[in-house]
Image (cartoon, grey):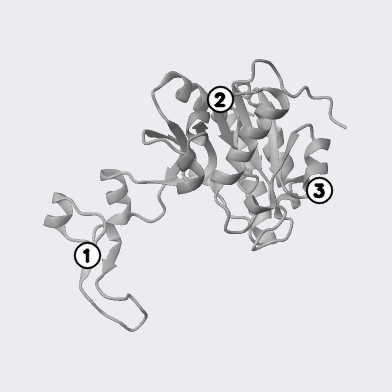
Amino acid sequence: MTSKPNPKREPVNVVAIIPARAGQQSIPYKNLQKLGGKTLLEWAIEVAFEAESVDAVVVSTEDPMVAAEAKKLGALVAPRPTEYAQPTSSDAGFYTHAVTWMEEEFGWTPEFLVNLRPTSPLRFAKDIDHMVEHIKSSDADGLKSVVPSPLHPYKMWQIEGDGLVGSSGRLLPVFYNEYRQIHGPDQPRQKIQQMFPVFFQDGQVDITRRKFILRPECLEQENVWGNNLHGFVLDPRTSTDLDEPADFIRAEKIYEEMQNERGE
């Protein structure tokens, strides 16, 4: 059993919320699968405790087995209603439930909510701390981790018509500016990314403010964000999909490599 204090300090202003459904479409109980000897859930809880800026660590789950593992690791468990734990459920449900639960159970009204998805385990506590520091010191409504986009929209199109295989129609560029108009679509990918940097939200770390969770439109429109979003650029190696055993082996090697580089 862990002896880690949770919350780490009061008043609680920054809470790490770790969403951990039992059901996964690719791998059953994916959040309890092991990477480098630790479950994905443990990776998320561990980095949340390591982050100096995080005041409390909460796991949102509907499943007793996941809840037991979370408690063993020192996290508090928000018992997520089944209606918010479906494959098609949006983030708005578990955010709303967790915020309400924290206030009812402990009287906490944290301003900042840090979403650490277990399926993105290659995170570092210092990056979380930098992100919390940024949103606290800025006017940002929310902050998302991003990585350079592996596919640039410069080469993407919409097509008139139904877009079914075998059909044809006029191509409409998704990314369109004066340079593209002059030089056309066939430019080197590396050159285009350097000239017009584009980033992809990778879901490793999201930070939003409580006030946006409390709005009626949070659940109505499934939107936990304000309009003024900022990004924090992460090493693209940390963005990984874990769908097969080989993915887990590769991710462990990447993390060890990055630890050595960062001296952690």
Residue 157 x %, y % = 28, 64
What is the three-letter code of the residue carrying label 3?
Answer: Pro
Residue 183 x %, y % = 15, 57
Q: Earlier in the sequence, mark 3 or mark 1?
A: 3
Q: What residue would you read off at disc 2?
A: 129
Q: Earlier in the sequence, mark 2 or mark 3?
A: 3
Q: Are marks 2 and 3 in contact (CB under 8 Å)?
A: no
Q: Are marks 3 and 1 in contact (CB under 8 Å)?
A: no
What is the three-letter code of the residue carrying label 1?
Answer: Leu
Label 3 to label 1: alpha-carbon separation: 50 Å
User: Camera-side residue: 115 or 128?
Assistant: 115
- Residue 233 visible, this angle: no
- Residue 244 visible, this angle: yes
Residue 65 x %, y % = 82, 49
Q: In the shown orientation, is residue 141 left or right of residue 240?
A: left
Q: Which mark is residue 112?
A: none
Q: What residue would you read off at disc 3?
A: 64
Label 2 to label 3: alpha-carbon separation: 31 Å
Label 2 to label 1: alpha-carbon separation: 42 Å
What is the three-letter code of the residue carrying label 2?
Answer: Asp
Find residue 243 and report its image quarter: bottom right
Which residue sits at x=64%, y=29%? Answer: 264
Which residue sits at x=46%, y=33%? Answer: 143
Which residue sits at x=72%, y=54%? Answer: 22
